[in-house]
Amino acid sequence: MFSIIIELVLGFLIGLSLGLLGGGGSILTVPVLVYIVGKAPHEAVTISLVIVGLNSLSGVGFHARGGTLNFRTALIFGSVGMLTAFCAASLSKAIPEAVLMVMFAGLMLVVGAMMLLRRSKPASDVSRRHGGLAVTLASGAGVGILTGFLGVGGGFLIVPALVILVGLPMAQAVGTSLVVIAMNCFAGLLGHLGGPPLDIDLLLIFGIAGVTGTYSGSLLARRIQPARLQQSFAVFVIVLALVLLADNLSKAFA
């Protein structure tokens, strides 16, 4: 019973960070599944794709009601991402678990640094340019590789790409990114099928708690200024990445 409560709390917090920060929160899912729940890294990546996908779908519903979705861009960006996510998922099965965790820690360092350096600006202050179809496809492909390979949503990359490269207003970029994340997670999950059987009970617990957390985070984001919270979260992500490196670096190159 106690373990279920812990899993509910963890699932809620992951969803809360995604809903509150608009990206970056899902990167905690794999470390939580490996070091707290006790799953093997490859299984954790597969489970993470389901959890992140469910949380993103719930966020899509919230944003659709608010009219902040650009489905045309999401379909173009996400379609190529689905293809690369599927291919990357197949390749990741051949990577040793310690190496996979080192790669994940490296990504966490990049995410933490990006969140620390990012400065919040109103949508009208962002210098946007419309990169056209080629830029949209290239951006989508890159994010899809990260999703399939490491089981992350990639919102920390999708939102800036949609604003700066594609030219969407920030309000649309956040909602549109959730559609892309859900599409990429689905494709990545297909690429991981055939591995160990999924823990359905765990998925239900994290899924329900995560959706609740995402909804709560989306409500809180309207009432509080998340800039300081984002910086604190970034420091936490960097510290956790250093812990992962310390635990796996010697194993990866043994």
Image: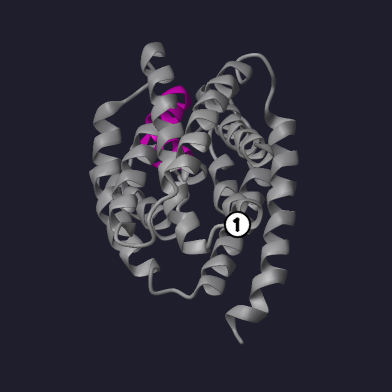
In the figure, 76 relative to 239: above or below?
A: above
Check residue 107 for magenta coloring: no
Residue 157 in view of the camera = yes
| Quarter of the image where the C terminus is located | bottom right
Farthest front residue in view: 1
Magenta span main SS? helix
Residue that mark 1 sits on: 38
Q: Picture coordinates of residue 163 (x, y %)? A: 44, 35
Residue placed at 57% from the left, 66% from the top?
101
Q: Is residue 155 left or right of residue 195?
A: right
Check residue 167 for magenta coloring: yes
In the figure, 199 relative to 145: above or below?
A: above
**Amino acid type, callout 1:** Gly
Foreground residue among 203 and 242: 203
| Quarter of the image where the N terminus is located | top right
In the figure, 31 relative to 128: above or below?
A: below
Residue placed at 75% from the left, 32% from the top?
228
Question: What scheme was used to colour the molecule?
Answer: one colour
Farthest bottom residue in view: 254
Q: Is residue 188 left or right of residue 216?
A: left
Q: Residues within 10 Å of mark 1 (few under 14, many from 20)?
A: few
Q: How many marks?
A: 1
Magenta span covers which residues? 159-177
Q: Picture coordinates of residue 123 (x, y %)? A: 51, 24
Residue placed at 31% from the left, 48% from the top?
135
Residue 168 in view of the camera = no
Tell me the element at label 1: loop
Q: Is residue 200 left or right of residue 126?
A: left
Foreground residue among 201 and 180: 201
Q: Picture coordinates of residue 70 (x, y %)? A: 31, 25
In the picture, residue 102 is in which quadrant?
A: bottom right
In the picture, residue 186 is in which quadrant?
A: top left
